[in-house]
Image (spheres, helix red, strand yellow):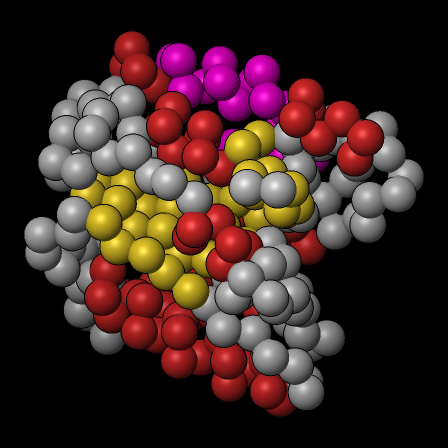
Amino acid sequence: MFGAGEFANDGRIEQLPQVKTDLEEFADFLAQHGYQVYKLYDKDFTKSRLSSIIRTLKKSIDYTEKPFIVCFCGHGIHRENDYFLLTGDTNVDKIEGNAIRIATLIKQISSLKTSRILMLINSCYSGQTLSMPYDLTTISDGELAVITSASCKEESYMLSDDPYSLFMGTVLEALATAKSQNSSATLFDFITYITQNVPLKASKIGQSQHPAFILRGIKENFELL
């Protein structure tokens, strides 16, 4: 779980107070269902600290069929042919030095000993990440699912009566609904719930938001919980 809603190094970047709430709630939910969770928020979320956690995971994680879930909440910026995730120490004049290239992140994570990767990207215009080249050759079984909170031309929104962002609130709702019905939360059901309900919620506030996704090498409808 990582993201930034506070940007001490650049006052030009809009603060996002809901980011920590989104990530904390999702982290707690996953921990309650057997996941080991690593968290980096705000000033602690830097490129070097994220790389350090990934190096630690390379040494400690054992091969498992349980999906490795990656979640980012915050600002994303598209520059030329790259999409960057803004860290807590980002300066917009030094994007390449501070922020994280999505393609580089995928490459780092795919080197872990895991069979499946599920990545959630909760940021404006995040659908642009789906045009990035994803290298699956280092993933044990080459299974990758990337779900973005919005299409390439849409913003990600908040609801005035919800403490979470529209996308993350729906993510939590999808998983909680499956568990309350004593059914497995599977990848395909998860995607269906999100892609149907986020646009409905956005329309209620007069906005348009359509999550997008890409599946690479998915062999079966695996369980998330």
Q: Where 221 falls versus 45 (above or below)?
A: below
Residue 90 drawn in magenta: no
Residue 117 lies, in percent from the top left, at 28, 41
Q: Main secondary structure of the magenta part?
A: helix
Residue 60 visible? The answer is yes
Q: How many marks?
A: 0
Residue 50 lies, in percent from the top left, at 52, 23
Residue 222 lies, in percent from the top left, at 15, 54
Q: Is residue 136 left or right of residue 11?
A: left
Residue 41 drawn in magenta: yes
The residue shown at (59%, 22%) is 47
Q: Quadrant of residue 154 in the image?
A: bottom right
Residue 20 visible? The answer is no
Which residue ends up furthest to the right in the rendered image? Answer: 11
The residue shown at (58%, 16%) is 48
- Point out the stretch of residues depicted in magenta: 37-56
Residue 188 lies, in percent from the top left, at 22, 66
